[in-house]
Every structure is written in C-alpha cells, then in structure tokens.
Amino acid sequence: MCGIIGYVGRSQALPILLEGLKRLEYRGYDSAGVATIEEGCITVRKEVGRIEDLRRAIGQHPVGGTTGISHTRWATHGKVTQENAHPHFDRSGKMALVHNGVIENYASLRTQLEEEGHQFVSQTDTEVLSHLIGRAFDRSAERTTSAMVTAIREALQLVSGTYGIAVIHAELPGVIIGARRGSPLVLGIGKGEHFLASDVSAIVGHTRDVVYLNDYEIVVLNGEGFTITTLEGNGADYNVTKVEMTDEDVGKGDYPHYMLKEIHEQVRSVTDALRGRLSHEEATAKLGGLNMTNAALRSVERVILTGCGTAFHAAMIGEYAIETLAQIPTECEFASEFRYRNLPMTKDTLVFVLSQSGETADTLAALRESKRKGHRTLGICNNVASTIARESDGGVYMHAGPEIGVAATKSFTSQVTILTLIALLLGRIRNLSSSDGSRIIAELEALPAKIEQVLTLEAEIAAVARRYAQAKVMLFMGRQYNYPVALEGALKLKEISYIAASGYASAELKHGVIALVNEETPSIFIAPNDALFHKNLSNIEEVKARGGPVIGIGTQGKGAELSLVCDDVILIPDAPEYLTPILASIALQFFAYYIAVELECDVDKPRNLAKSVTVE
C-alpha cells in the first residue's frame, strides 16, 4: 500500500525516483508524485493515474536536482485527485513531505491549525502532518537540519496513528529526513549517495546494503552519510543488512505478467521451503527457527493461527493439518479481529502469525497483542528483515523469493508447505510413529514434481477459463482441506477479474447456496480422490439437476467418474489430503489468471488493491 522512494547524492534524482516508483507499482496506487530541490526551490509534479502519466507530465515540464522524494498513493483520506496526491507542502511552501500510513487524529489537528490561519488544499491527513512539521520548524530560530529533526519530533508526538515519512526542505539542500511508526521504511547505503524507500525492491538496482528502520526512529541522510536516532532524541543501534534479492528477481523475465511468472516459480519456492527441513533419520521436520525445544513444543495444548486474506486461507489448511497429524486443538483467527477480541487463551497456547510481507498492519498488531498477553508468538513470513520477523519470538522463513503480483500465489503454497512441516514436527513429538513420519516426508519430497505436472496443464486450464470468462457470478466448493481452497480460488478470481465469486463448504450447498445455482452461474468443485469423493459427486449432481454448469478439479484416476457429471474436468496428480490443496490451488490460480487475461484486466495491478496492507 502506497510507496516511497527518496534519493540524495550526486546523480540527477528524477530518473532514480521514477524507476523506483515503477518498481513499487505492485503495491497498489491511484496517483503518484515527485518533489525535488533545485536552485533553492522545491518543485513538485504529481498526476492521477499510472507512473507513465506522471512521466509524460514531467516530460512537458521537466524538473532537476540531486535531492528528491516521491510517492505512489493509495487513497484513504480524500478522493483520487491531483490535489490529494503526494507530495504535500507545509504552510510556507518550502517543505515537502510524502507519507504512508494513517494519521487517526488528523481532523482535530486540522481544525486547530485552521483556527491558527492555516489553509489546506487537499482532504488528506498527510497535509495536516506537513503543516504540523512546518509550523514547528518555522518557530525555530535556527534553519538547520538539527532544528528540522526537532520539529519532526515535536509534530510526531502530537499525532496518533501510523506513518512512514520522507521530508525535504528548500533551505536544507542535500538532506532527506525519514521517520517511521507502523509503516516500513528502509535506508539504502551507496557510495556518495543514499536512498530511502518503503520497500527494498525500489532500490535494489542501486544498492544491496540497507538498514531497516524500527518504529519510533528518525533517519537523516545526505550524500556522504546518515544518522539514526529515536523519537525521544537518543542514539539508535542499527544493523547493515545485505539484501538477498537481485535486480533480476524483481523483473518479469519473459512472462507477460508477474502473476504468471510467480505461478511457475512454485516448483522452486516449495522446494526452497522444504530444503534442509526434512530429517530422514528422525522422520520429522527440523525447524530450528522456532527457538523451542521438543519439550517446550510438547507442552503446547492449543495453537492459534492468524493472518489476513490469502494468509488466512493458508492458516485454515494448517488448522486441518495440525489437528489431523498432531492432534492439537487449533483455531484460525482473522488478524484484523484478533487484536479486538477478548479471546480466551490458556498459558499453553502457541500463536503463529502469517504474513508474506511481514509488514501487514493487522497481523503485526495481532502479534503485538499476543506478546502483550505473554504468549509465545511465532512468525511465518517471506521477509527475514520485516517487522514481524524482528518482533516475533521465532518462526519460519518462507524462502519464496520476491512476490510482486498483487494476487498471492507462491506465498500461499509456501505457507501451506511450512504449516505442513509444523504439523509433522508437532505430530512426531506426540502421536505419529516413525513410519508415519517417513511416509509424510516421502510425500513432501515428491511434491515439487507433482507441482511440475500441474504446470503442464496450463494450456488446458486456459482453454477452460476462456469458456467461462463471461460469467457474472461463480461458486467455488470443497470439503475439509479443500474448503479453504474454494475460498482462495474465489478470492483469486474476484481479485483480478472482478467477477463476483464466493467459496463455500460443499456440504453447505443445500443450506442456502443452492438458491444461487442457475444456467449462467458456473460452480467449481474441488473433488479429489479422498474419503468424501462420492459426497462431492452427490453435490455436483444436485447442481447439474438445476441446470448449473460444473467444472471439476479432481485427481488422476477419478477422471471418468467426474466426466459423467461435470461439464469440464481438470485432473491434478493424486496426493495425500494434506497436500492436495497445494496442487488444486495452482490449478485455480491458472484459472483466475486466464479469465482475467481474457477480460483484458490489469492482472498485476488490480483496481483498489494493494500488495501489502500496511494501514488498518
């Protein structure tokens, strides 16, 4: 959600800023802007629409300078207009600011400032913050970087909410100041130049050495160096981290969309999620990052899994796996609800928080609430330097590599893979025999090859997708492990094609859902070869009896039976019930992708969506 990149150094800032904004497009946005310092003045250019619209506008009215900040906005306060796009000025017009996050008490602060004579040109909370900082700086007798930092501290102590900000001032050329609370900010270290960004992907083409800022930290950077202090004014320790991703990792390669590239990367991402984590000798999983002994894990009497969106669907599959393989009562909670519920939790409860980015605001809040109550809280995320990774008591790194497409694909299957490893580990400590563990390991090791087989179905699935692309409503249904897959399949479809899709437990068909069945509404059933296969067949028959078209996602060996009752059948490799969701979800990812392509939707940048939801 929203993106920031700033540059200070010897080079012209504008090309670097525009390139960085382009890299941040996947986060979701509706407008963009830049501000640079040139000859003692700040010049701002901003446009509604895509980065290319901004680039064209700048081509007509060029800007220069070696210091600048830029932003992609995802509207929260105020409509999508040029006035509401960032950067925003203070009252003097000499200071510009870009901001990710939400200032919750902006309305009362705005009223106070208006009473003092301040005039605003936007409806945003960000402009209020700009005026607060500018007011504090203008009260200072000094016009120095130190005075600006003091002004930022004073202003930030007045606000409630979250922020990641970058600030420049015309009287302080060659200086950028950043601060964060609840919204990620990373400092990029170069030679004679420095960068500030909300996401490392924006700057990885220029530097691999970064510092991830913590909450309540302020950074001052110029071309030659930087300093980091706390909001209280104390010095702050920091670690310089070497970024693992490369410039090529954040490119599309030969694929037309990031989403398609990332669907195909799932052989590697699942392999990497398993690498080094299977012990044949002990017939179990090895997850040292949990930072828990077997004795401590054995004392766990309850597991809570929490996340948002796709991560929540992965958690639901994890719930089935942990309860089945380890016999531990497990619950899934929406992270957005967890922080507000008075959830009864015994002292032996273990909490896992799931987030691809490791910066999801609701999930981070759930983590902090769990820790506040004294529960051991572990993270499953894809960014080892993220806030969730740093603040959790331990966890498991996904190793999925950068996921740029807004619609999650490989992160979902990596999360499910890791939750299966956790279920195996907990099961072996408790009730699973060595032979059971060895069988599960063999199935996990065979999984990448089975994913490869699903990828060979791409053209077949694309043809099916095109036949149903004009549907206005679709129903997805599955049982047990595949009920979350139905939810995830529906989510993928509505995210990128805007078709009204809903997922249900197949057994709920007669309890209301069947009222939606008609000749124009396709139903997609995930019906693998499991104990409930014939129950699924019965549900399919009920849909067909009412004229509803049916697409069956089945497993090899059951194609003949499915073909008798389905209009179209897609057969994935046979697998144990705890791994079928991974294979079925990839088929549904292809299905959603090719429908969106047929409808000429913007697959990687779907409307109104953001990759990382860093505000509540």
Image (spheres, rainbow, N blue to C red):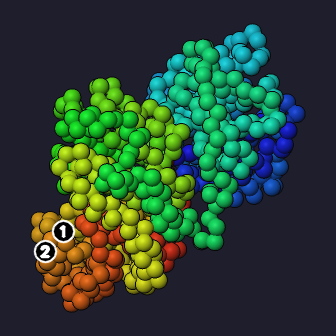
The residue that appears at 68% across and 48% down in the rendered structure is 204
The amino acid pointed to by label 2 is Lys
Contact (Cβ within 8 Å) of mark 1 with mark 2: yes
At label 2, counting other C-alpha atoms closer than 10 Å, the crowd grade (few under 14, some 14-19, many 20 or more) is some
Give the residue furthest to the right: 39
Q: Quadrant of residue 295?
A: top left
Q: Which residue is mark 1?
A: 506
Compare residues 127 and 201 and report the one nearer the observer: 201
Q: What x and y, as percent, mark residue 32?
A: 64, 49
- Of marks 1 and 2, the one in the foreground: 2
Q: Determine whether, in the image, residue 583 is placed left or right of residue 533.
A: right
The residue that appears at 60% across and 54% down in the rendered structure is 25
Q: Secondary structure at mark 1?
A: helix
Q: Which residue is mark 2?
A: 535
Residue 611 in view: yes
Q: What x and y, as percent, mark residue 521?
A: 28, 77
